[in-house]
Image: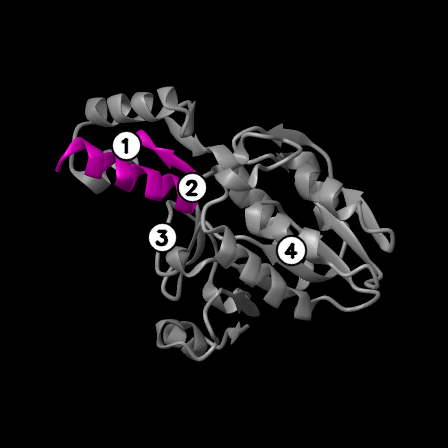
Amino acid sequence: MLKEERQRLIMREINLHNKVLSVDLSILLNVSEDTIRRDLKELVDSGQILKVHGGAISKSLAAPLVTNDSHVYALSAKQTIASKSLSLLKNNMVILTEGGTTILELAKMIPSSLKATFFTISPQAAITLSEHDNLEVITIGGKLHKNAYLHTGASVINDISEIKVDLCLLGANGLSPQEGLTDNDWDVVQVKKALIRAAKKVAVLAISEKLNTTQRIKICDIGQIDYLVTELAPNDPFLLAYHNADVQLI
C-alpha cells in the first residue's frame, strides 16, 4: 500500500472516530507501528491532526470553545441529522447531552421557542446551548477529558446518578446491531453508561459511516437505544438491521 493511500485511510479513521490508537491502525492497515508513527508525525506536521499519547485525534476536537467548520468531517450529513433530531425535542423536557460535532450542530439549530432544561457534560455544548434565551443549561462539571472535551470521572458519574431526564442525546464512535454502542476510551464509556441509566429515552445521532463499526469497549446493547438518527431516510435498506432490532429510525 502506498503511503498516500495509507495516510488517506488513517485520516478517514480519525475523522470517523475522532481518536485512533497507533496499535489499532497498525492492525487495520497491516503495517508496523513504526510506520504508523511516521505517518502520524507527517500528518501532525502538515496540520491535519493532533498527536496524543498512543495515537492521534481529529482537529475538530482542538478548540475547547469553538469548532471551526472547516475541520468538521461530513458537516452536511451532521447538519441533516441535527435538523431531523429537532423532532425529538419538546417543550418542558429535561434533556441530557454529551458533546461532539453533531450535538453542537443540533444545539445551534434549536428554535428560540423551545423551553427546556439541558444538562450537559460538554463545555462546548453548554456554551452553544446558552445562546438560547428559553433554555436552562446546567453543566455537570468534573475532570475535563482533553481528548474529547467532556467532563469525566467519578464526580460526574455521581452527579448524573442523581437526576432523571426525559431524553439523552448521544453521539456514536461505533454502532452495530450485534455489538451495540461502543467507544475506545474507558473514562468516556463510564460516563456514557451513566448518561443512559439516567434517561427514560436514548437517542443516538450518527452519520451512516459509523454504523456497522465496532470500537474496543462496549457502552450498551442496541436494545437500550430508542432512536437512531442518521442522514439516511428511515426506509433506506442500509438501516434494515437496525429496524429489525426495534430501534425507531428518524
Residue span colored magenta: 1-23
Does 243 lie within the magenta span? no
Of helix, strand and loop, which one carries label 1? helix
- Reading the image, the residue beneath label 4 is 106
* Residue in front for this viewpoint, 45 or 95: 45
Work out whether mark 1 precedes mark 3 in sequence or the reverse, and give the earlier one: 1
Mark 2, other Cα within 10 Å: few <14 / some 14–19 / many ≥20: some
Work out whether mark 4 precedes mark 3 in sequence or the reverse, and give the earlier one: 4
The amino acid type, in three-letter code, at marker 1 is: Val
The amino acid type, in three-letter code, at marker 2 is: Asn
Q: Overall secondary structure of the magenta stretch?
A: helix
Q: Residue 230 appears at what percent x and percent y?
A: 49, 64
Work out whether mark 1 precedes mark 4 in sequence or the reverse, and give the earlier one: 1
Work out whether mark 2 precedes mark 1 in sequence or the reverse, and give the earlier one: 1
> In the figure, 127 relative to 235: above or below?
above
**Mark 2–mark 1 contact, CB under 8 Å?**
no
Work out whether mark 3 precedes mark 2 in sequence or the reverse, and give the earlier one: 2
- Reading the image, the residue beneath label 1 is 23
Work out whether mark 2 precedes mark 4 in sequence or the reverse, and give the earlier one: 4
- Reading the image, the residue beneath label 2 is 184
The amino acid type, in three-letter code, at marker 3 is: Thr
Q: Residue 237 appears at what percent x and percent y?
A: 36, 77
**Mark 2–mark 4 contact, CB under 8 Å?**
no
